[in-house]
Image: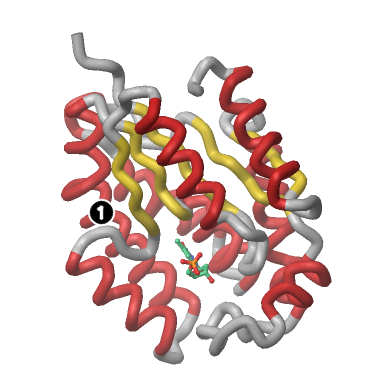
Amino acid sequence: MKPAGLFISFEGIDGAGKSTHIEALAAALRAQGRAVVLTREPGGTALAEKLRALVLNEPMDALTEALLMFAARRDHVLQVIEPALARGDVVLCDRFTDATFAYQGAGRGFDLGVLATLENWVQGVPATAPRLRQPEVTVWFDLAPETAARRLAGARVPDKFESQPQDFFARVAAGYAARLQGDPKRFLRVNADQPRDAVWAEVQAGLRERGLL
Ligand code: TMP
């Protein structure tokens, strides 16, 4: 019998250090015999990667930014996420809709009600309506904006978001905290201000507790 699909997203402000843990988790799940799809937002399809290049590099207003994030997400959900879950794969997605609420909503100050409407349109799954497609678990790498800024300093040429001032990231972090409050069961909060091994141990422990690893 094929396993049930599993959708896990990973969130945090820029510099929180998600990437190595996403890869480690993919390896751990594959070692347990699971088929794993590693993907990211914005991106994950040819079209969505083109939209990513635009949204991360071109100046635009918050509505345009939000619409492009959701346009990329729609293509990604239909082309990659839904088919993978239907096959029984594990989808590990580096950022999903919580990032739009945190960055465009809390960070840029864009209307949360409009974002919620877009979320309903884009993540409505026709076959299982009226259910919204959401990750089963969202691993949130929680890190103070000052620490993230120190980590990012000089690391690479910053994109449009990475070059935002620290108070922008303080709002984004508060935006993530608000999303957690709205759906505490879905979130696995990890203290990202620790050595990498300790962060990885927390990620594994949280997923084991939920019977997912
Ligand atoms: P990444 O560097 O983690 O791949 O993320 C790309 C950037 O895009 C990151 O700075 C966060 C931002 N972003 C948004 O502003 N809204 C979104 O909906 C998503 C998915 C990412």
Residue 183: image quadrant is top right
In the rendered view, how is the structure colored? secondary structure
Q: Which x, y percent locates residue 80? A: 21, 47
> In terms of depth relative to the viewer, which is nearer, 36 or 6?
36
Q: Which x, y percent locates residue 139? A: 58, 41
Q: Residue at x 46, y 49 (%)?
A: 23
| Image position of 159 (left or right of 170) | left
Q: Residue at x 30, y 49 (%)?
A: 122
Residue 75: image quadrant is bottom left
Quarter holding the N terminus is: top left
Q: Which x, y percent locates residue 55? A: 39, 79
In the depicted structure, whether residue 13 falls above or below residue 39: below
Q: Residue at x 54, y 68 (%)?
A: 104
Read off the residue under disc 1. 76
Q: Which x, y percent locates residue 36? A: 31, 37
Residue 45: image quadrant is bottom left
Q: Residues within 10 Å of mark 1 (few under 14, many from 20)?
A: many
In the depicted structure, whether residue 190 falls above or below residue 211: below
In the depicted structure, whether residue 36 falls above or below residue 106: above
**Which residue is outermost to the front?**
31
Amino acid at the residue labelled 1: His
> In terms of depth relative to the viewer, which is nearer, 185 or 4?
4
